[in-house]
Image (tube, rainbow, N blue to C red):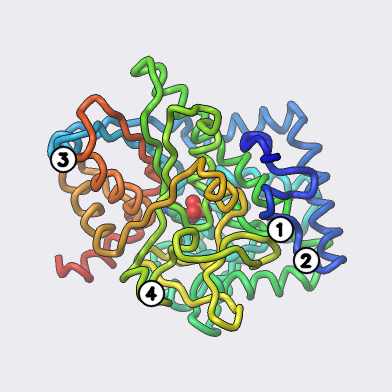
């Protein structure tokens, strides 16, 4: 029997055959302790109230939904709407789960919060949440990303976190995860690893999803209130998959709503190492303590990946996405670096909204599909973050 997607995971952290806790015994104990602490705070009213208050007063929630009228008219088809996670404090959806994780760390009496970061968004959001809560924070970041995402690096330093540059291998997100994990393993009792997406061993895929699910709860209610109906399509970009799960969760039970996750096809899915379309091109495997779709080399090691968006270049993907793909409940599509850049510029010039390169993948998919649909159809896109961090890079690439 298949699980009800809205009730996942099971007690062992499985989403169908995906997820679980593929970790050594002492680490399994640490994960079980986190799961138990999370189960306790999740049902405590004082915790829920504190998080809700921070969402409102600190993050600026609810984030609005915006009807992109000029973009829709220009494309000449379905109406495109944007859930404005780019307007959150720190500029993306990641602050939602970072606040949750920082509050959990405080509740558990942890002495240090450790994490990796790709585009730097998770690092900035976590350093922010740790400053607010008052816990030391250590962020591992690939050297390639450090050079590409300079403004975020500066922000992390200002926010008082310890930044650890990672130079091994391709020096991007995967290596940063490995490095941060090694530091965590030196003392899993006193440290907590704040995973930056719906990935890793249980309970993280569940916990990060729960903290992010505010996105879809708000968006569903806002859309209903505005239009008296639900959107026809709901789309979000997928790296590890947290903004997408945050958006999709509220809609899983709505059969009329087509859910679309957009993966980065980079320079082409026919070019191994030059894309990060894990669900589209990968196969079931293991990475970072979980079972999920993985992009692998012939020898079973994780493949090199690439996307113009640093936050999307990860060779694994959340276990719940892996299961939702197999169930056919979510459709996974791709957008290339080129389409992403085009969407980035179009949204900037037609609506005055500069999107994160990650989010621009979801916008690119909507721009491709909208003209094929009638004008009374509605596409809701999760605009996961703002593009300030990418502006200099894009200007250089396009020679603006
Ligand atoms: C990190 C990031 C992503 C990718 O992470 P998910 O876990 O897949 O959401 C997407 N958009 C933005 C703006 C990000 O910072």
Mark 1 Cα shell of 10 Å, populated few (<14), some (14-19), many (≥20): many
Establish whether ligand 1 lies closer than 8 Å to the Cβ of label 3.
no
Q: Residue at x 86, y 59 (%)?
A: 29
Residue identifier under label 1: 201
Q: In which quarter of the image is the C terminus?
A: bottom left
Establish whether ligand 1 lies closer than 8 Å to the Cβ of label 1.
no
Contact between marks 1 and 2 (CB within 8 A): the answer is yes
Q: Helix or strand or loop: what does disc 3 sit on? A: helix
Disc 3 versus disc 1: distance between alpha carbons?
42 Å
Q: Residue at x 61, y 40 (%)?
A: 211
| Percent of width and height locating residue 286 | 65, 67
Total numbered badges shown on the rendered structure: 4
Going from N to C along the chain, the mark reached first, 3 or 4, is 3
Residue identifier under label 2: 23
Establish whether ligand 1 lies closer than 8 Å to the Cβ of label 4.
no
Contact between marks 3 and 1 (CB within 8 A): the answer is no
Going from N to C along the chain, the mark reached first, 1 or 4, is 1
Residue 327 visible within the image: yes
Q: Residue at x 38, y 52 (%)?
A: 333
Q: Helix or strand or loop: what does disc 2 sit on? A: loop
Disc 3 versus disc 4: distance between alpha carbons?
29 Å
| Percent of width and height locating residue 246 | 53, 41
Going from N to C along the chain, the mark reached first, 3 or 1, is 3
Disc 1 versus disc 2: distance between alpha carbons?
7 Å
Residue identifier under label 3: 75
Q: In which quarter of the image is residue 380?
A: top left
For residue 49, above or below residue 396:
above
Mark 4 Cα shell of 10 Å, populated few (<14), some (14-19), many (≥20): many
């Amino acid at each position: 029997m298949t699980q009800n997607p809205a009730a996942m995971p099971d007690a062992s952290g499985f989403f169908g055959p995906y997820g679980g806790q593929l970790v050594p015994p002492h680490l399994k104990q640490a994960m079980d302790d986190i799961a138990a602490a999370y189960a306790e705070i999740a049902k405590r009213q004082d915790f829920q109230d504190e998080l809700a208050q921070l969402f409102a007063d600190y993050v600026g929630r609810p984030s609005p939904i915006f009807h992109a009228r000029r973009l829709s008219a220009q494309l000449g088809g379905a109406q495109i709407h944007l859930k404005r996670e780019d307007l959150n404090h720190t500029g993306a959806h990641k602050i939602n789960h970072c606040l949750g994780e920082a509050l959990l760390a405080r509740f558990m009496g942890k002495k240090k919060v450790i994490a990796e970061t790709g585009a730097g968004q998770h690092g900035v959001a976590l350093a922010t949440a740790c400053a607010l809560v008052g816990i030391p924070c250590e962020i591992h970041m690939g050297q390639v990303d450090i050079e590409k995402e300079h403004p975020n690096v500066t922000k992390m330093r200002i926010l008082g976190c310890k930044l650890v540059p990672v130079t091994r291998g391709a020096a991007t997100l995967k290596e940063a995860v490995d490095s941060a994990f090694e530091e965590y393993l030196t003392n899993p009792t006193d440290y907590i690893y704040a995973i930056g997406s719906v990935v890793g061993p249980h309970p993280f895929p569940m916990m990060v999803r729960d903290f992010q699910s505010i996105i879809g709860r708000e968006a569903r209610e806002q859309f209903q209130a505005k239009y008296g109906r639900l959107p026809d399509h709901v789309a979000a970009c997928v790296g590890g998959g947290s903004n997408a799960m945050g958006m999709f969760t509220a809609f899983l039970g709505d059969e009329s709503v087509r859910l679309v996750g957009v993966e980065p096809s980079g320079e082409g899915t026919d070019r191994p190492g030059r894309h990060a379309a894990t669900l589209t091109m990968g196969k079931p495997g293991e990475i970072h303590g979980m079972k999920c779709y993985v992009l692998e080399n012939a020898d079973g090691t994780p493949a090199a990946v690439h996307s113009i968006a640093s936050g999307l270049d990860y060779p694994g993907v959340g276990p719940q996405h892996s299961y939702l793909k197999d169930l056919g409940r979510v459709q996974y599509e791709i957008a290339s670096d080129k389409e992403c850049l085009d969407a980035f510029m179009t949204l900037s010039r037609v609506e005055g909204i500069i999107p994160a390169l990650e989010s621009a993948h979801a916008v690119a998919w909507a721009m491709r599909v909208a003209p094929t649909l009638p004008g009374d159809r509605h596409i809701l896109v999760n605009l996961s973050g703002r593009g300030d961090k990418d502006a200099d890079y894009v200007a250089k690439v396009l020679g603006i």
